[in-house]
Structures are given as C-alpha cells and as structure tokens.
Image (tube, helix red, strand yellow):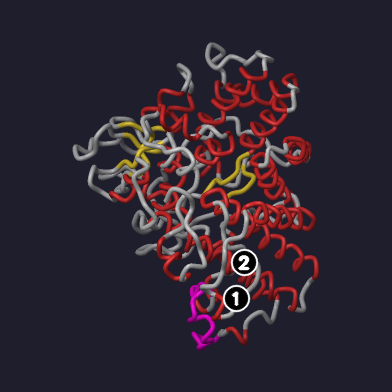
Amino acid sequence: MSTKYIIKNTLIAFSVLFMVGCSSDFLDRKPRGQLTYDTFFENEDHALQAVNAIYNIYRSWEFTALPYLGATDIVSDDADKGSTENDALYLAEVDNFQSNATNSVYSSMWTGHYQAIFRANLAIENIPNITMNEQLKARLLGEAKFLRAFVYFRLVQWYGDIPLITKILTEDEYFTQSRTSAGEVYTQIEKDLKDAIDVLPEKSKYAPEDLGRITKGAARGILAKVYMVKKDYTKALEQCEAIISSNEYSLMPSYADIFTSKGEQGPESVFEISAVALQAAVAGPGASPYNMVQGVRGVPNLGWGFNRPSDNLVAAYEPGDPRRQATVIYVGEILPDGSTKVEDNPDILNERYNQKAWVPKHAGLQDNGPGNLRLLRYADVLLLAAEAYNELGNASAALPLLNQIRKRARGTNNFILTDVTTTDQSQLRERIRKERRVELAMEQHRWFDLLRWGIAGQTLKAAGKTFIDNKHELFPIPQTELDLSDGVLQQNSGW
C-alpha cells in the first residue's frame, strides 16, 4: 500500500531527538547530529516530526509485543501464553495470575507508555510557539492530544490511580510524581479527546499519503469507549451515532480480508497504526515486532508462537462461524497467501496461532514486521452502539446493529449465525457481549471489556484462572517505580 505516511518524515528528527525518552539525557541537551533541543521546534517540519515520533512509539516493543499481549489477550480468557512450555515464564505468571510487582510485563507497559506521554507533552508544549500554517498546527496538536489520551486510557484501566503528567518535567520532578485519582485521569482523557474532535478532520479529508493519521472518527470512537467504562451510555451513544452518520466507515464484505494487506487502512479502519518493513536486513523504524512474537514458530514463518488462542475462545464460536477460521490457524492448514502449510512443532502443546497477526513474506527478519496495528474497527463501534442502546432500554435499535455484524460474518451462508431476535434486555446483553468476543477475538479488547462489565473475576475463574477478587482487577504498580519514588507512590491493594 502507499499510505505508510508516518514513517517518511520522522526518521532524521526521531533518531536525533526523541529516542532519549524522558531520561536525564534529554536535559543534558548534548548535540546528537545536527539537531538539538535548542535548534528543534523551529518550523513546520519539526512540528510534523514531533508528532510522528509519538506514532513511532506505538510500534515499539512495549506497545505491540510480549508485554502488551501479556497485559491484554494472555491475561484474559482469549489466549494462553503459547510458545514452548518454558519460554518466557514471566508471561505464564501473568496468564495464571501468579505474578508480582517485579514482573517485567508491568514495568515494560508502564515505562513504554510514559515515554509516549513524554513525547506527546513535548509536542503539545512546543508546537504552539512555531510560526506555521495555523490549520495544520491545530490538527497536529489534536493528534498529539489524542495519542496522549489513548495512552492514559490504557494506563488508568491497567493500574487505576496513576501519575497524571501533562507538561515537561524538570529533572528534580522525575521521581516526585504522586498518583492522581482515576476520576481526574478520566477527566483529562475526556478533555484531550474533545479537543481533538474539535480540530481533527474526517478520514476522507486526508490526502492519500496521510491516510492513517488520527481522525475525528477515531477520537469519537475512543471517547465512546471512555463513556462506556463510565457507564454513561447516552454520551457513548452520541459519539457512536456521530461516527455512523458520518458515512466515513463501512464493514468490509469479507471478515478474513480485514487482517490481510487488503484490509489495511480500509473502510472499516477507524484507528490503525501503519507499519512497514523498510530495510532488507534488519528491523527498521517503521516496523513492529507484533507479527513476529505471534507468528508460526518454526518453518515457514519463523515466529515465536506466543499468544495462543485458548480452548475457551475456540469453544465460544457458534457452529460454522467463519470468524473462527479467520482468527485461529492450526497445524496442517494452508497459510492465507496459499504459499505453504503450517508444519507441526513437537515442542509446543496444543499448537495453534493467532491468524490475525499473520503477515506474508517480507523484507528482513520477522522482527521487521510490516503488519498494521488495528486498534479500533467500525465493527467495534457498531457493537458499542448496540450495547449502549440495550443498556438504555432500546432493544429495537440495538438489534439491527448487532445483526449487521452477524450478517457480514455469515456471508452467503444463510444456515449459520441467524439474526438475533430477543428483546429481553438481559438476554440481549449476553448476546452482544458474546458477539464482541468472537468478532474482536485476539485483537486485545477482551480484558478491557471484562473489566468494564464487572465480570472479570467470575469469567476468568470459570475459565480455570486463579483470579483474586478486589486484587487482580488492577495490575501492580511496578516495583521499580515504587523504589525510585522513595515512598511517594503506593502499591495497589492486595499486591
């Protein structure tokens, strides 16, 4: 595809300035190449590069690889650790709810996401001072605020009360940040997203080379999710209906095509991070490890085989549901591009893989992953709207939205996935929740859904996990952060 836009204007400035993260190295302001802190943020290109650098971290290890999968799919009932039995035992601890605050999943997610916040704050604080096109300036600030809000939305769901940082910290402020109440964090998230909605264009207004930048629809979609967490179904529905009525999005005819190159930045894409294998020998800055860590272990894909779709997930599909075939790939099956079949790896028990993360042969090794990261699909928005309507007592409005999803999934086979007809609120709630699971399986949504529904404990204990109520709903604050704060940060209850 021709829309891997984020990468093309980022590399020089990113390598010089933004790799420093939030460490004291940044404050040293030592020249690294031709650009330094004192010579940056002077023109329009610098503003673009600053925002692109936020997008860049969304393709990082912390955002796409084992820590991320551990904190989303693997911790839920959608997936098991996968790979060989003794590989990455820290993920097995998360999978079985036997981890503690020293587990690297929690520290990696914390560090990586706060690095993204640092980059967003840097852009938001400095871009207003640049003399440039005012419309572009407003848009870039909207993108940065969205990207910051999205990160905080993840963090507050994972950890609860967290430090809320909306400015560049001085060196003596690094380890003095206390936890802000989750309510205040949500207030900031909502403000950032509303600010973004006010200035961002719709998807169709972007030039082809900019396809994939944050849109008004993406900001509305994440704001709808925020309202769903807060159980403000009326406001969530307002955002979902604004997306639907914009006519900017539609369901792709084929469910399986969504997760191939054909579906990248397609009509169903509301928020998607582009990736590309730019270099022939090593992983380039436009790639991500997302595909590699979940890929078929051994020939032909040479992946790592983590994030195995669970028995529990496989059993959740209705008989004949084509989405199971598009989500799970087994030994002996032909790869989506028809190139070869999946060979047995005798070191892996109950071998199967996440087909949605599969990518065909590409430049470089497997860590040079070119697969786009699909973070919000139109199907998700439709199901959120259906759920909100049902919770507001309007089943007749919820049913057509739910059945749109089922109709696309069944295709031309009218003997499967028949329309849901119940108008009983409780029954319809269960049908919508089940539909969300199988429609969005292995796309890193399930854990967050279980939390907002308040059923994480009962669901995961029923799936055989050692979940402890009033503890495991939140992750522990990483022990490294507690130690560095010298008592300023306090641990979550039960940890």
Residue 74 image point, x, y percent: 40, 42
Report the residue marked by disc 1.
169
Vertical position of residue 170 compared to residue 328: above or below: below
Mark 1 touches mark 2? (CB < 8 Å):
yes
Residue 489 image point, x, y percent: 51, 64
Vertical position of residue 397 compared to residue 337: above or below: above
Magenta part of the protein: which range? Answer: 18-34
Residue 50 shown left or right of residue 137 in the figure: left
Kind of residue at disc 1: Leu
- Can the viewer see residue 53? no
Residue sitting at x 71%, y 58%: 192
Kind of residue at disc 2: Ile
Residue sitting at x 70%, y 65%: 140
Residue sitting at x 36%, y 64%: 282
In front of the other: 463 or 176: 176
Vertical position of residue 277 compared to residue 412: above or below: below
Q: Which mark is residue 165?
A: 2
Q: Which mark is residue 296?
A: none
In front of the other: 392 or 238: 392
* Residue 449 is inside the magenta segment: no
Q: Residue furthest left?
A: 346
Badge 1: residue crowd in 10 Å (few <14, some 14–19, many ≥20): some
Badge 2: residue crowd in 10 Å (few <14, some 14–19, many ≥20): some
* Residue 32 is inside the magenta segment: yes
Residue 21 image point, x, y percent: 51, 72
In front of the other: 314 or 494: 494
Query: Circle 1 sits in a helix, a strand or a loop, which is it?
Result: loop
Tell me which corner region of the image, top left, top right, bottom left or bottom right, holds residue 466. Answer: top left
